[in-house]
Amino acid sequence: MVLVTGAAGQIAYSLLYSIGNGSVFGKDQPIILVLLDITPMMGVLDGVLMELQDCALPLLKDVIATDKEEVAFKDLDVAILVGSMPRREGMERKDLLKANVKIFKSQGAALDKYAKKSVKVIVVGNPANTNCLTASKSAPSIPKENFSCLTRLDHNRAKAQIALKLGVTANDVKNVIIWGNHSSTQYPDVNHAKVKLQGKEVGVYEALKDDSWLKGEFVTTVQQRGAAVIKARKLSSAMSAAKAICDHVRDIWFGTPEGEFVSMGVISDGNSYGVPDDLLYSFPVVIKNKTWKFVEGLPINDFSREKMDLTAKELTEEKETAFEFLSSA
């Protein structure tokens, strides 16, 4: 049982087909897809439901479209929380947090009440890190390690920028890291990244020999890529976001390849990188048996330290604002 919220929206439109065709959970895993959206979107959702039926996907046992949390969250194995209140023009980040705390408090409580305790929860809706923390706090009977938020899109963006610069494919680049918040303070770090050139693996810094680009333009390009897409497309990134969600969930399900790590927002408790506990922060992780672990022992230079602290500070402030609303929501 897989739930996608915000199922009448843009990202879901790119995502649902990939889940239904076996790209995420494997080609022999039958799926029941649950689609949740708000009541005014039910007409659109019916159209999405018809299209999924018309895809005639052999693995799709059933599709349930609903606007009721008690239907949507029942017996779930995986919950992909895409739906959130988008930031509107003239809206303060504080207003955005307030609106989303309400949504994710309610969905966290519904997970707690109706879903399996083993459910894996992936939060995509922004502000993703803080929304994920809110949902986790509102579902005390589900282990906090089961909650993660999407920074894989940023991770993929970072890989792609390096690949473009070196004229290789993104597959030749591995072990980039996104630290921190899925916001413009995130820190894309390639100090530990490797690239395959002429059949040999070399460090990205060594391969590029362009430190000023790596510390400057590369970082800001990845940080601001979402805004650049909106500017060009007049809509937010949906195709690349859906692809990143698939990557993220497939890695949770099947594990990360040997010798590779990926970035995801997870609970910071017990990390060795000086990030305060009780934050939902993006780290490098490896995954095995559906369980993630921090990648330990990576040396952190002063440039990285400063960037990592900056994004932790933003997350701490967001958390404080959200929790004021959480107690009154």
Image: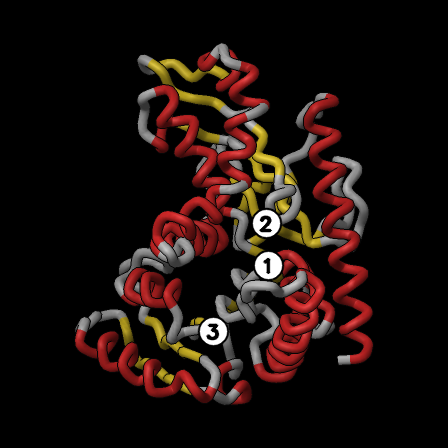
Residue in the picture at 68% in, 66% down: 97
Residue 5 has which mark? Answer: 3
Where's residue 215, x and y in %?
59, 23
Task: Say which amino acid is labelled 2.
Answer: His
Task: Say which amino acid is labelled 1.
Answer: Ala
Q: Which callout, 1 or 2, points at the residue further toward the start of the chain?
A: 1
The residue singled out by tag 2 in the image is: 182
Q: Is residue 140 visible?
A: yes
Q: Quadrant of the C terminus?
A: bottom right
Q: Which callout, 3 or 2, points at the residue further toward the start of the chain?
A: 3
Q: Is residue 246 left or right of residue 302?
A: left
> As rendered, which of 263 and 76 lies closer to the eye?
263
Residue in the picture at 52% in, 32% down: 176
Q: Which callout, 1 or 3, points at the residue further toward the start of the chain?
A: 3
Q: Are marks 1 and 2 in contact (CB under 8 Å)?
A: yes
Q: Is residue 90 left or right of residue 248?
A: right
